[in-house]
Image (tube, grey):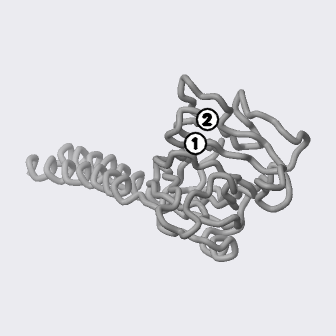
Amino acid sequence: MKNDAYRWVLAIVAGVFAVTANNSADAAVIGTFNSRAAWETAAGTPDFFEDFSGPGNLLPVSPPFVTGSLTIEGISRPTTAFPSLVRSSIPAESVDGTQHLLVRIGTTQSHDASLILTFDRPITAIGFDLNPNPGTIHNPAGNNPNVIDFTTSAGGGSFNLPTTDVTEFRGFTFDMPFTSFTMTSNSFFPTWGLDNLAAVSSPVPEPSSIAVWSLLALVVGGTGWYRRKRRAA
């Protein structure tokens, strides 16, 4: 009887770790969208929005750019000649005719190695408008487009920059919350405008957390039940 009880407790503990491991392993991007309307339908109503149209025409972002609950910073190479971000409204680089952030990340030594967007609360969806700097569109035929890779604690993926001077939307939804969205690129010179950034906060509580705590409660309750049964015997 004693061995059976211990095996029962060990099985529950293993279940707790299995649920946790599965949740981590299964974390991934669950939706990719090129339409803001479709993204909002899938993700829900954004509770964060930034159009970067504050004061100042040309503002190098160093130290990191902070707006509300969002911090944006570049991870520079030692030889970086330009800041990773510039708030700009230059017509030739415009996203929607208003101020935006000009992003410089890539393999050239004058660009940053990565760009990190950090939220002060967990989110499950992120979306933004983008437009390539016309001077860096090297593939007007659409061959080998500049690719931006992204990583989060909830999974990663990539998106292509437009191959013509047009504004496009990129949006993503995730099955687990995260706070940091890191962008990198293996392209040589992808300079592009980021604008109208939106995000959807994670609902509380998380279903996976409820499952884990429920299993832990079973472990504690089962152990107590076994001890009471032994004393009664």
10 Å crowding of disc 1: few (<14), some (14-19), many (20+) = many
Q: Are marks 1 and 2 in contact (CB under 8 Å)?
A: yes
91 or 195: which is nearer to us?
A: 91
Amino acid type at image mark 2: Gly
Residue name at image x 26 percent, y 48 percent: 13
- In the picture, measured across the screen, residue 213 lies left or right of residue 123, that is left
**Image location (x, y in percent) of residue 26:** 36, 60
Residue name at image x 69 percent, y 75 percent: 37
17 or 77: which is nearer to us?
A: 77
Tell me which numbered mark, 1 or 2, is placed earlier along the sequence. 2
Tell which tag, 1 or 2, sits nearer the viewer. 1
Residue name at image x 88 percent, y 42 percent: 57
**Image location (x, y in percent) of residue 1:** 8, 52
113 or 16: which is nearer to us?
A: 113
Query: Residue placed farthest to the top in the image?
Result: 78
Instruction: Examine the image and state in which quarter residue 202 appears.
Output: bottom right
> Can see residue 152?
no
**Callout 1 secondary element:** loop
Q: Which residue is mark 1?
A: 105
**Callout 2 secondary element:** strand
Amino acid type at image mark 1: Ile
Residue name at image x 49 percent, y 52 percent: 149
Q: How many marks?
A: 2
> Can see residue 81?
yes
10 Å crowding of disc 2: few (<14), some (14-19), many (20+) = many
188 or 127: which is nearer to us?
A: 188
**Image location (x, y in percent) of residue 208:** 44, 58
The circle on residue 14 is none
Q: Is residue 69 above or below residue 25?
A: above
Q: Which residue is mark 2?
A: 74
- In the picture, measured across the screen, residue 214 lies left or right of residue 137, that is left
